[in-house]
């Protein structure tokens, strides 16, 4: 019988709280495989999937589950010497060199790992011509995992999964999803640390096109491969930008925009019980992402921290992740976001707090924020839609 062995990531570090993380992971796997035929069980530090139909489809889905370090598709046999040896008598190698590894997870099994591996290697040598053992760089590795459920699992491949922490174990946060390359990557990286995400997008119709909004919806859809479902808050920023453009110094356009965005994001966080704001900012990448700019921007927040997982990454690193999670091609579609509207020729790169506060005195901030929140449209995006 075929089985899929699932190995935990860093859950083994969690001590007395481990059961909480394991339960969340167990539930996340069931949710990811909703609609599939399968049986999920736990045995001695492993999760096990059996009684499934489409192996390839199951593996692809499981590879996106945070908290899983790796998986292997294995043959399940009875954990006794006769059945294991009989299985190995039928193995025909396709490579010239091989190695057998045995993990005796069940210490009650009477034969020690190295002795059993040696015996199984002898069986392969006897039944395969012109092959040899290579303990260091084998072309083919055959692994046997003996578990406490009375079963042994034989496999050749270890498939890397996402690692990280099970989704939801670190709480909920609000991702500022712009439509560029960086913010989806930031969302993915924080989801990998167990944060379940909602997303906030600012649009400036008619200065930005409906296609720009659809692009963001498509990016949110991509992220549901890892986040299961995303509640997308779409907020009109048109009146805010028009007011800043009309009343404030041009070089402070981006700084004031970002400060108002943060205020709106915090209000949504406080209203909806979200514990942090996530952005795709990378230090020094653009004028709004200098140390001084980010300090002035986040100064408006009273209760909500900002998580910036891309802060120390260069653009090539971010692009690599974007390609791996399949958001890059969508992110580079030529539909501009609201940050390009009324873009000043020479934005200030080292703003001082008192300067930003003086510019904001020229605006009716509360009215602008209230009107923006009144425009809020909520779109529920699910992985299987």
Image (spheres, rainbow, N blue to C red):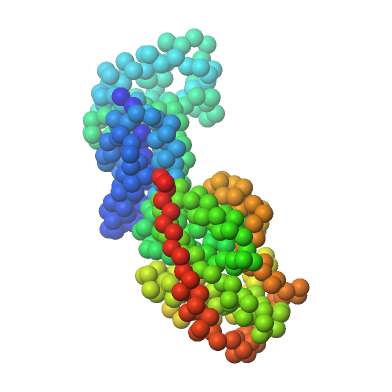
Residue 156 placement, left or right of 137: left
When asked about the image quadrant of residue 51, the answer is top left
Residue 15 appears in view:
yes
Residue 156 image point, x, y percent: 44, 28
Up the image or down, 278 lies above or below 297; here it is above
Identify which residue is drawn at 31% across, 15% down.
86
Up the image or down, 365 lies above or below 258; here it is below
The quadrant the N terminus occupies is top left
Residue 359 image point, x, y percent: 64, 87
Identify which residue is drawn at 54% across, 84% down.
365
Residue 70 image point, x, y percent: 43, 41
Residue 158 placement, left or right of 354: left
Comparing 47 with 82, the one in front is 47
Residue 287 placement, left or right of 301: right
When asked about the image quadrant of residue 291, the answer is bottom right
Q: Residue furthest front?
A: 206
Residue 305 image point, x, y percent: 47, 73
Residue 146 appears in view:
no
Identify which residue is drawn at 67% across, 54% down.
334
Residue 250 placement, left or right of 66: right
Comparing 189 with 121, the one in front is 189
Up the image or down, 121 lies above or below 206; here it is above
Q: Residue furthest right?
A: 345
Up the image or down, 359 lies above or below 166; here it is below
Identify which residue is drawn at 55% across, 67% down.
202
Question: How many labels, in total?
Answer: 0
């Amino acid at each position: 019988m075929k089985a899929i062995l699932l190995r935990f990531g860093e859950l083994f570090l969690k001590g007395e709280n481990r059961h909480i993380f394991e339960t969340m992971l167990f539930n996340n796997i069931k949710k990811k495989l909703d609609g599939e035929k399968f049986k999920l069980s736990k045995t001695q530090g492993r999760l096990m999937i059996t009684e499934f139909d489409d192996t390839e489809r199951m593996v692809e889905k499981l590879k996106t589950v945070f908290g899983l370090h790796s998986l292997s598709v294995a043959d399940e046999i009875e954990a006794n010497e006769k059945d294991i040896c009989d299985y190995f008598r039928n193995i025909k190698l396709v490579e010239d060199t091989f190695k057998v590894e045995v993990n005796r997870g069940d210490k009650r099994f009477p034969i020690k790992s190295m002795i059993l591996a040696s015996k199984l290697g002898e069986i392969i040598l006897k039944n395969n011509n012109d092959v040899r053992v290579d303990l260091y760089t084998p072309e083919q590795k055959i692994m046997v995992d003996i578990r406490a459920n009375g079963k042994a699992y034989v496999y050749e491949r270890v498939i890397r999964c996402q690692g990280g922490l099970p989704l939801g174990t670190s709480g909920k946060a609000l991702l500022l999803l712009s439509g560029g390359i960086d913010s989806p990557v930031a969302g993915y990286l924080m989801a990998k640390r167990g944060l379940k995400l909602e997303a906030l997008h600012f649009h400036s119709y008619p200065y930005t096109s409906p296609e720009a909004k659809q692009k963001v919806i498509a990016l949110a859809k991509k992220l549901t491969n890892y986040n299961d479902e995303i509640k997308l808050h779409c907020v009109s920023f048109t009146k805010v930008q028009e007011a800043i453009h009309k009343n404030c110094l041009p070089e402070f356009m981006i700084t004031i925009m970002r400060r108002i965005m943060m205020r709106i994001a915090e209000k949504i966080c406080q209203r909806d019980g979200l514990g942090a704001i996530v952005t795709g900012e990378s230090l020094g990448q653009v004028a709004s992402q200098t140390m001084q700019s980010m300090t002035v921007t986040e100064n408006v927040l009273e209760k909500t921290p900002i998580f910036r997982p891309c802060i120390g990454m260069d653009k090539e690193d971010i692009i690599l992740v974007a390609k791996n999670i399949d958001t890059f091609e969508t992110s580079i579609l030529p539909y501009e976001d609201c940050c390009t509207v009324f873009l000043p020729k020479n934005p200030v790169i080292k703003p001082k707090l008192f300067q930003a506060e003086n510019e904001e005195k020229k605006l009716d901030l509360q009215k602008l924020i209230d009107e923006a929140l009144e425009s809020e449209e909520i779109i529920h995006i699910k992985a299987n839609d």
